[in-house]
Image (cartoon, rainbow, N blue to C red):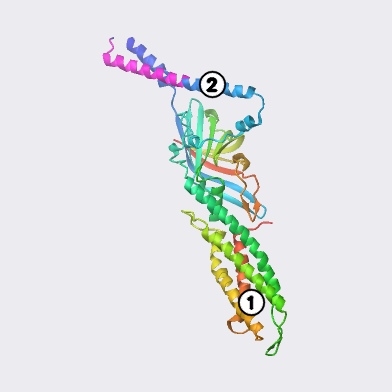
Amino acid sequence: MKITCLVVLFALSPFALGQTSETWVLTQSTLSYHMVHPVHTVDGVSHGARGKGICNAGTCEFLVAAPVKSFDSGDTNRDEHMIQVTRGAEFPIVSVRFRLPESAINSPTLDCDLEVQFAGNTAHYSHIPFQQTVQGNTHRITGTVPATLTDFKIPPPSFLTVPIKNEIPVKVDTTWQRQ
Amino acid sequence: MAVSPLGSKLFLATLLATTLTFAGVASAQSYSSSDAVSEISIAALPDAPSALLAQQQTPPKPQDQKQPAAQNPNQPSLSDLGLSNAPDPALQARLDKHTQMLKIHQRLGLITLIPMAAAVISSAGASAHHNGDQVTGGNTTSRDVHAALGGVTVAMYGATAYYAIAAPRIPESHVKGGIKVHKYLIYVHLPGMVLTPILGAMAFNQLNNGEKVHGIASAHAAVAWTTVASYTAAIVAVSWPIKL
């Protein structure tokens, strides 16, 4: 009888009940910023992002991060200028954190509140819609972060003495796998 | 049914671990609730512009970026991703200097186009009139003006080049894009910028001596035009593709 009680007690203890965490890993990613200058437009692309998600107690915490220098616009000089103006040597990582309820993890549309750390500043973007397609264990999430230079206090870089536009939307295309 | 001493110890250890887990969760909850209280108390304060700005955008300390998820073990951290946020102030200083010098290079390069264009335009009046083998002088003032503008162009070009050459090099940079063409074109306009004034000086002396421009000096115009074309192409190369 005592043993039965012990087994029941142990089985009902929170130690045994919850705390089962689930991990998500970013397997593929394409992040691209779009920059507009009066005489030309530029897209800087990075495939160097890494990401991880941890689901626990009904909430999933995600982190996606990429080295600033991994963005390639097709021109060395421009990329160096981008790293300089975003203080990419002092703050070499751009990171995005967001939280999702575990129940929404398979939803075709994700409404995310993002916390973006970039260039030594943190900006928050609320209710950013992302589209999701689920194929088996693989989740592909796409969307656009409406970032601007002023969000991160970045002085607008200029070319031929003319500055670029303030808006630098970042397209996100990520593929996640449940582990 | 008797419970063995080992079983009792195991049970006690489990209970202890469970209690500690609860304590951890409770402290985390109290942390977030105190956080919420502080948020409410801040919200209750009068609207100070600085406070509003701080709420919208909080510049983190560099230390915050190094370990952003130290408090919450459920949050993934940069170290989980195998990434390091270690700053490199020396590289940043190098990049700042590099950009500053290249900005001056860019401005001087554009300004150099002005005396260059003026020298090209003034070249029309710099040539002498030929009457068979006789040279009738032409307008010597125009020739002097052309020579002076050429001199200014060469001096400005030298200053422009200095800021590109003296800019600190950035490691790990494999050159690609328009800047590559920009750099290749140096091999055309740099010798051109050296040769053009030399040939111009030779032509100038020959004309002033009443001679027809001859020998290598007769290549002055062709070399000058090649230099102007390659210099302009070098500017276009870093601006390409142009969308108007």
Seen at 60% across and 67% down, the residue is B155
The residues tagged by marks 1 and 2 sit, at their Cα atoms, a distance apart of 80 Å
- Report the quarter where the N terminus of chain B lies: top left
Say which chain tag 2 marks: B
* Circle 2: element type: helix
Taking the magenta stretch, the answer to whether it contains residue B101 is no
Q: Report the predominant secondary structure element of the magenta stretch.
A: helix
The answer to whether B101 is drawn above or below residue B43 in the figure is below
The answer to whether B226 is drawn above or below residue A23 in the figure is below
Residue marked by disc 2: B34
* Circle 1: element type: helix
Quarter residue B146 falls in = bottom right
Q: Amino acid at mark 1?
A: Ala
Seen at 29% across and 16% down, the residue is B7
Q: Which region is colored magenta? A: B2-26
The answer to whether B22 is drawn above or below residue A55 in the figure is above
Q: Is residue B173 left or right of residue A7?
A: right
Say if residue A165 shows up in the picture. yes
Q: Is residue A6 left or right of residue A109?
A: left
Q: Which residue is at the front of the view, A110 or B147?
A: B147
Percent from the top left, x then y, of residue A94?
Answer: 52, 41
Quarter residue B121 falls in = bottom right
Say which chain tag 1 marks: B
Q: Which residue is at the front of the view, A106 or B32?
A: B32
Percent from the top left, x then y, of residue A63?
Answer: 50, 36
Check residue B221 in the rendering and tell me which mark sits there, or answer none: 1
Q: Amino acid at mark 2?
A: Ser
